[in-house]
Amino acid sequence: MIILFLTLFQSICAPPLREAVICQPEEINPYSDIMHAVTTIESSNGVNLYNAKEQAVGWFGIRPIRLEDYNKRTGQNITHAQCYDYEIGKRIFLYYASQVDYRDIKGICIAWNGVSKENKYYAKIKSVLSDYKN
């Protein structure tokens, strides 16, 4: 009787639960360190989102001429006021930065801020990066 009961019980049980757990991987952004350095230089990491002298706005300090160039190249119609939004600023920055190898910090600085005789911008970025990594 017990064997018969156990046999019936085994056939009545639900099958074992078989499920797959899919985890969302962390975003890989090889430009994250340089983005941190640029936002530190351009806006003190979001503390100062407007530079009246250069008419630069947002986390990435986007100037009107840079935005005009971006809109022309991409066919976008982003306004200067929209550049206060971090994600929009990030998209614009990455457009220029991604045209240079992510390991070429100097090249990214030139792509983003232009070239100068003294490369002061590059020196500032290097300084922030060394502080950030320590």
Image (cartoon, rainbow, N blue to C red):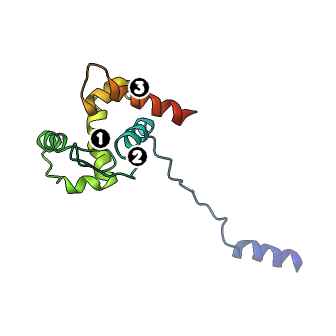
Q: Which residue is mark 1?
A: 93
User: Residue furthest toward the front?
Assistant: 53
Q: Which residue is mark 3?
A: 103
- For residue 70, what is the image quadrant? top left
Residue 123: percent from left, percent from top = 39, 26
- For residue 94, what is the image quadrant? top left
Residue 44: mark in rendering = 2
Looking at the rendered structure, the secondary structure element under dot 1 is helix
Residues under numbered marks 1 and 2 in contact, where contact means CB atoms less than 8 Å apart: no
From the image, state whether disc 3 or disc 2 is nearer to you. Answer: 2
Give the mark nearer the N terminus: 1 vs 2.
2
Residue 61: percent from left, percent from top = 29, 44
Observer-nearest residue: 132 or 76? 132
Query: Up-down: is 39 above or below 104?
Result: below
From the image, state whether disc 1 or disc 2 is nearer to you. Answer: 2
Query: Up-down: is 72 above or below 120?
Result: below
